[in-house]
Amino acid sequence: MGGEGKICIALGGRSRHHELEFDRPERLPANCRSIIEGWFRRAISKLHAPESECFEPFIFTWIAFNAWAEAVTGLERETGDKGWVETLSRDEFLFGKFANRIQNADDDVTRAAQQFRRYWPIPKMQDLRSKEGPSGWLEIDPHEERLRFFEKYSICYEPRCAPQHVASSIPLDWEHFIRATYRVRCNLFHGDKSLYHPDDQIIVASAFRALAGFLDGQRIFPR
């Protein structure tokens, strides 16, 4: 499959080519496909919900996306989530499709992705709590100061290549987007996002709207 894009050297450059089987989900048992598609329908029905109501739709989207990704990569048993996230993030076809989608400044996916990028890199919230770093990381500005704060308190974050992009900002592309979204997924699934904190609501909502909107536009899950 085609697709244009520049893979981030700071994230390791091009990985060993792994052929994705985009038709593999169609070969899953009908009941499995129905469950996956049902999760996504539940998510997409909330695409324009208030930010405070986007936590569950994000989870529904990720469950469906996770199942699809494991099918097309065939990597879950070998590498766990991180393996398929890395492989999928460097797929040239998806890289190109995402690039094409966000070229339209008036597109809802573009606006959500741009809003989400303003919060990058996304820290590992367990680190923030366990290392007892000061709160208010989102108020630390400029970007370089935030990164120094993360380094000082040994806070992991995604995209992990952020220091190499300080001068020009982290690229808004599929590779960086999906890695940042996976960090949100981990924070949320491990209970480290507050339903009541406005910044957490914006982060989760913008990640959800960008990912779900993009997947819906590619017709990955029939509705």
Image (cartoon, rainbow, N blue to C red):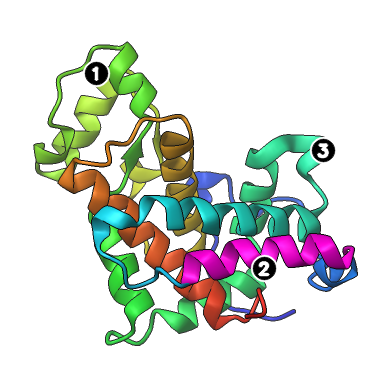
- N-terminal label among 1 and 2: 2
Separation of marks 3 and 1 at Cα, in angstroms: 35 Å
Separation of marks 2 and 3 at Cα, in angstroms: 22 Å
> Callout 1 environment at 10 Å: few (<14), some (14 to 19), or many (20+)?
few
Task: Point out the image quarter for the C terminus.
Answer: bottom right
Mark 3 residue element: helix
Mark 2 residue element: helix
Image quadrant where residue 154 sits: top left
Which of the two marks, 2 or 3, is nearer to us in this view?
A: 2
Mark 1 residue element: helix
Amino acid found under the numbered disc labelled 1: Lys
Q: Which residue: 34% across, 87% down?
A: 104
In this orientation, which residue lies closer to the viewer: 203 or 222?
Answer: 222
Q: Is residue 65 left or right of residue 158?
A: right
Amino acid found under the numbered disc labelled 3: Arg
Q: Is residue 53 left or right of residue 145?
A: right
Separation of marks 1 and 2 at Cα, in angstroms: 43 Å
Residue 163 horizontal/vertical position (percent): 32, 41
Image quadrant where residue 23 sits: bottom right
Q: Which residue: 25% across, 50% down?
A: 201
Range drawn in magenta: 28-44
Residue 44 horizontal/vertical position (percent): 48, 71
Q: Which mark is residue 152?
A: 1
Residue 74 horizontal/vertical position (percent): 83, 51
> Callout 2 environment at 10 Å: few (<14), some (14 to 19), or many (20+)?
many
Q: Which residue is mark 3?
A: 77
Q: Which residue is mark 2?
A: 37
